[in-house]
Image (tube, grey):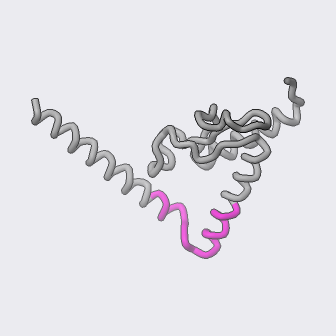
Amino acid sequence: MSIGYSTVIKLRRIEAECAKMGLRIGHSKYGSYREHGDVMAVMPTDDALPIYSRDAELFCGTLDELSRWLQGAAWMHDYYSMLKLIDEKKVQKKEEGIRHDRLVQKLKNEEIVLKGN
């Protein structure tokens, strides 16, 4: 299969959009059942979106489907921002709380293992 340069440009644009949202594109573990075309998955990157595990597939589909999914996610974010339901400070505060809670839980589990020895 060969692709045109416009597809390469589209993929680069989508990768950049994903990176801004704390996402990365990768191979789907579950999407190979699909009948049409290449499928890809979108997962959280590094420390972004801490409520999800690092291997959670938040999206699985083709490049065109991913483009539409990202447009919907951006629309939702913009809409909630206009309603003042979310802003960057609120999001960062909640995410830090989740990271902190997970770190405390991890330390507690390590302490239990150490006491068990």
Q: Residue at x 40, y 54 (%)?
A: 96
Q: Position of residue 58 (x, y in %)?
A: 58, 47
Tell whether 38 sits left or right of 90. right
State the quadrant of the N terminus: top right
Left or right: 106 in relation to 90: left
- How far across and how far down the image is residue 87, in percent? 55, 65
Residue 90 drawn at (x, y percent): 47, 64
- Residue visible at 71% across and 52% down in the picture: 69
Location of residue 19 by image quarter: top right
Quadrant in the picture for the C terminus? top left
- As for residue 109 lying within the magenta part, the answer is no
Horizontally, is 106 left or right of 40 in the view? Answer: left
Near-viewer residue (29 or 16): 29
Q: Main secondary structure of the magenta part?
A: helix
| Count of all numbered marks drawn on residues in the image | 0
Q: Residue furthest bottom?
A: 83
Outermost residue on the top side: it is 1
Image quarter for residue 9? top right
Magenta stretch encompasses residue 86? yes
What range is drawn magenta here? 75-92
Residue depicted at x 33% and y 48%: 102
Residue 20: percent from left, percent from top = 63, 47
Query: 82 or 112: which is nearer to us?
Result: 112
